[in-house]
Image (spheres, rainbow, N blue to C red):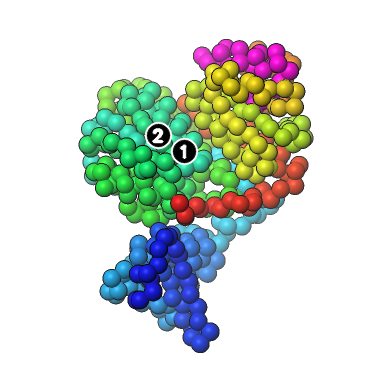
Amino acid sequence: RTVLPRLRGAFALAIVFPEYPDRIIGARLGSPLVIGHGEGEMFVGSDALALAPLTQRISYLEEGDWAVVTREGAQIFDLEGSEVEREIVASGASAAEVERGNYRHFMQKEIFEQPTVVAQTLSSYVRQGDQTVALPQMDFDLSSIDRMTIVACGTSYYAGMVGRYWIEQFARVPVDIDVASEFRYREPPLPKGGLALFISQSGETADTLAALRYCKAQGQTIAAIVNVPTSTMAREADLLLPIHAGPEIGVASTKAFTCQLAVLAALAAKLAVVKGQMGRDEEQEVVRHLLEAPACLNQALDHDDDIAAMAHTIAPARDVLYLGRGADFPMALEGALKLKEISYIHAEGYASGEMKHGPIALIDEDVPVVVIAPSGPLFEKTVSNMQEVRARGGQVVLISDADGLAEAGEGCLATIEMPRVHPLIAPLVYAVPVQLLAYHVALVKGTDVDQPRNLAKSVTVE
């Protein structure tokens, strides 16, 4: 009662005492903390997943709460010291979900789970019978949204970048997007009645949560795309859009990313429908293509052995560039992030058209350039950028479909063939090769794939 009000910053504490071995004091401010309820035993942990092998009955401490936990139960107090009740809920997390099974790493398991979990995600957002998009019940009029703000960090930010392409293209609603760590410090003016969308795997990312509260104070309607439906972000949102990816243990996000993309595609389509920008036939076409994604992801995974073999050509590099155009530009950023996260190779992603504005100075025979280029309207322009790389002695790794490889694959250092897919689902499918490439390069280099140095799964400090 006297010490906690004097603490500054964010914390989640579990304090034990030698003289009171059956007592734990738990407290949280800014960082998550949960209490697990057993039979004659109690637990304190960072989240429900951490306690999954021990109990399914969880109480979530609210901001500023502290608790006295004994074997018999827990007394919970709020920031003012008043005793409060926090509901005991079933977590839904199981111990089996946090086991590797027959896979070498959690990241590998989670990459290969993507066809299944994306199908699960889509089952919550599309009706296969009439092939329409369905969102959870909301307490506001989605058709009144004239502008949207997307805020996220890391891989979730790149998912948001892809989502911006879809929302602006389908719904014709302008979208601002920013990284959470910068968003609130520039104090952006926000339109009255606007929708602010926050994306986070854990739902506890400190910068994103702080930005959410800033937007809420500015009168924005809050939507959250999260993987943990009981997280702080989920509880504080006006509209919760869960991705249903299941527990993601590997620090480098994989299946959560593709599930975020699936939800963003559904949101873009629904917004387009209610804004009168998409007719019934177009909506059904979008749904058909989304439902093709799981099978296409399986086809992409069939090239795992090929990618593993060519990883040996990338592993010696000190620097790698990734290029993409349109919605494939965020995929270039994501590919570069994955490679540097788990292999510790310096990698950068660029929009293909920006290469001549600086990055081309880095090109030589020692810098592989990974080009993400499905065949389509933008392919010819990307081929032109590839030719610029080759003219300067650069080595190209081309990721494309059979048509693209037939046109531009000759002379490349390596090629990775993907199935021919509709542009809508290309970002989901092309996530697989950049994930597998990073994974196999990391294996060659012998790094810790699931827990790379200096990184944490959930970033709960600003």
Provide residue 377's location: percent of width, then percent of height. 51, 14
User: Element under label 1?
Assistant: helix
Q: Between 141 and 135, which is closer to the camera in this rendering?
A: 141
Amino acid of disc 1: Tyr
Q: Earlier in the sequence, mark 1 or mark 2?
A: 1
Rendered location of residue 58, percent (x, y):
42, 66
* Residue of label 2: 177
Figure quadrant of residue 26: bottom left
> Is 92 situated above or below 225?
below
- Amino acid residing under circle 2: Ile
Residue drawn at x 56%, y 56% as measured from the top left:
97
Q: Residues within 10 Å of mark 2 (few under 14, many from 20)?
A: many
Task: Judge whether residue 375 is colored magenta.
Answer: yes
Q: Is residue 164 visible?
A: yes
Q: Which residue is mark 1?
A: 157
Q: Which residues are magenta?
A: 369-397
Horizontal arrangement in the rendering, residue 354 relative to residue 12 (left or right): right
Residue 200 vs 360, above or below: the answer is below
Q: Is residue 75 part of the magenta span, yes or no?
A: no
- Closer to the camera, 346 or 376? 346
Residue that appears at 61% across and 52% down = 454
Q: Residue at x 26, y 30 (%)?
A: 146
